[in-house]
Each structure stands twice: as C-alpha cells, then as structure tokens.
Image (cartoon, helix red, strand yellow):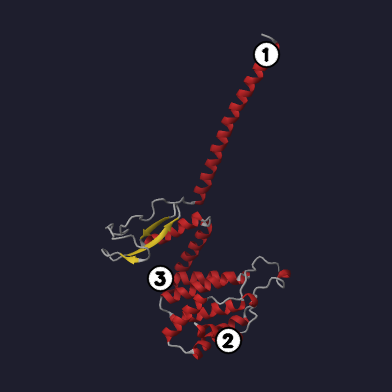
Amino acid sequence: MSLVIWVIIIVAVAVYLYNKRQKVVNSQDQKINEAHIVATKNKRNEPSLDKTIGEINAVCPYCEKGLKKKPSRKKQCPHCNNCIYKRTRPYDDAHIIIREDQIEDLEEQWAIANGQFDLYLKEKKRRERIKDRLTDQYGNEPTKEDVEFRALNEQATEHELKGNWGFGRNMRLKMAKNLEKRDSYKLALRIYCHVCFLDINGPNNRGSTPNNSLKDFPFFTPENAILAPGVIRLMNDIINKLEYDIADTKQEFIEVTTPIHKGSPTPISPEKAWLSLREELLAT
C-alpha cells in the first residue's frame, strides 16, 4: 500500500476520532449547562409551572361533587355553598375552576409564566411585612383587603416619588375598588376623585427621564388627558349610594385634590379640573 493511501487513512481516522470526541464534549457541556440552569432555579427557589392546579371538569373543587356545568364566573357550589372561581391555567391555557385558597397559587403561576417571579416574591414579602406590622399595631390579624389596600398605597407612593404618575394612578384606582368592595363608599369616592384629578392632568411615567429632559417630556400633559368612562360610571354609582348632590361631590373633590395639587407638579388646578369632571358626571 502506497504512502499516500496510508496518509489518507490516518487523516480520516483522526478526523473521525476528533468529531466523535467533540460530540462527547458538546454533550457534556450541554449537560453541565442544563445542570447549572436547574441549580440556579433551585437556588432561587423558583417553582415550575403546575399542570395539575385547578379542575377542568364540572366538579366542585371543594366537595368533588358533580355540577350541572362548569361555572363561567364566580359561583357558589349548590352542594357545599363554597365559592368557586373561574380562571385560566398558564401551563396550558386551560379554563379551570379553583378554590378560594388556590387564588394566590395561581397568581404565582402567572408570575412564573410572565417572567415576573422575582417581582411576585417582592410584593409577597411586602404584604407579609404589612400584615406583621398591623398585627403588632392593633393586636389582631388584619383582613386580606386591608393588607392589600396598604400595599397598593405603598406602591402608588413609590411610583409617584419616582415620577411614574401613570403607574401611581393605576394603583390609586385599585385602592378605590378595594374600598368599594368593602362598602367604604365615602373613602372610595374620595380616591376616585384623586384618580380623576390625575387623569384630567394627563399623567405620564417619567421615572427614567433625566432632569434636563423633563421640559420636553413633562410629568403631566393635559392635552393628552382622558377621563375613563368606566371610572365615571363607578363614581356615579357611589354618588347615588351616598345620596350626594353635585355640590356634595364638588366639596369632596376640592378637599381631596387641593393638597395633591400643592404637593405635585399637576398643572391643572382643582377648580378647573372640577369643571371637566362635573361635565362628565352629569353627561353619564
């Protein structure tokens, strides 16, 4: 056999052995990377999506008795009278029904699915801190709604201090709805006044805007202001429940918004803002 043929054979064998070795190395590297990812997740205690949470069939998640049909909204079980909640499972987008004690678990699942698990943990710790503080302050455990209200207030204040007035406004709206669900109508109305005052001023999120750019990108732009029809309807419902007339509503609005105007960069005064709100309230 000629020398050339031997060289070709030796080179071919060398290439084969090299490629085989690279496949082994790549496979090992992949396993190491996968192990690293798993270890990182475990280190952060980040759970994975649960494909078993919730009930996909028309069966009560409490007493496990059959239902005529799967509820499409919150409903009491006809057998055990517990509240059943309709939700969507992030693992497979399946429509499921759950117990009340599973609501927080499902919120965690959506936080994982949306890549916001760290934020979820942060807010969970906030609620736990508030709960502990209120328990120490009043000697008994606060309600879930009270903890939620105070957490929302903290979030709103944080957003506003950073210059994110739009995000702050959204938190204030949730605070108003929280109070309304608890039949605290007067306080809810006052916070709706707060929300509408911000809406009339046109809130923006400028938390990351340099100070020298705020002239061109201000915290508020009244020319872009929108009064949400849904909020106006909610306000009118509460006004009717409180049996307020337009003068009573104006008094609440001015009392609430005057200190806000003095302590914030809102360009529209409470008196001028009231004229816009009054027109919308009477038109609905």
Where residue 120 sits: x, y (%)? 50, 60
Q: What residue lies at 41% left-to-right and 76% top-to-bottom?
A: 182
Nearest to N terminus: mark 3 or mark 1: 1
Q: Is residue 141 above or below residue 190?
A: above
Q: Label 3 vs label 1: CA separation?
A: 86 Å
Which labelled disc corresponds to residue 5? 1
* Residue position for label 2: 275
Nearest to N terminus: mark 2 or mark 3: 3
Q: What residue lies at 64% left-to-right and 16% top-to-bottom?
A: 9
Q: What residue lies at 37% left-to-right and 63% top-to-bottom?
A: 72
Q: Indicate the amino acid at tag 3.
A: Thr
Query: Mark 2 or mark 3, which is nearer to you?
Result: 2
Left or right side of 135 for 218: right
Q: Indicate the amino acid at tag 2.
A: Leu
State whether residue 130 appears in this view: yes
Which labelled disc corresponds to residue 17? none
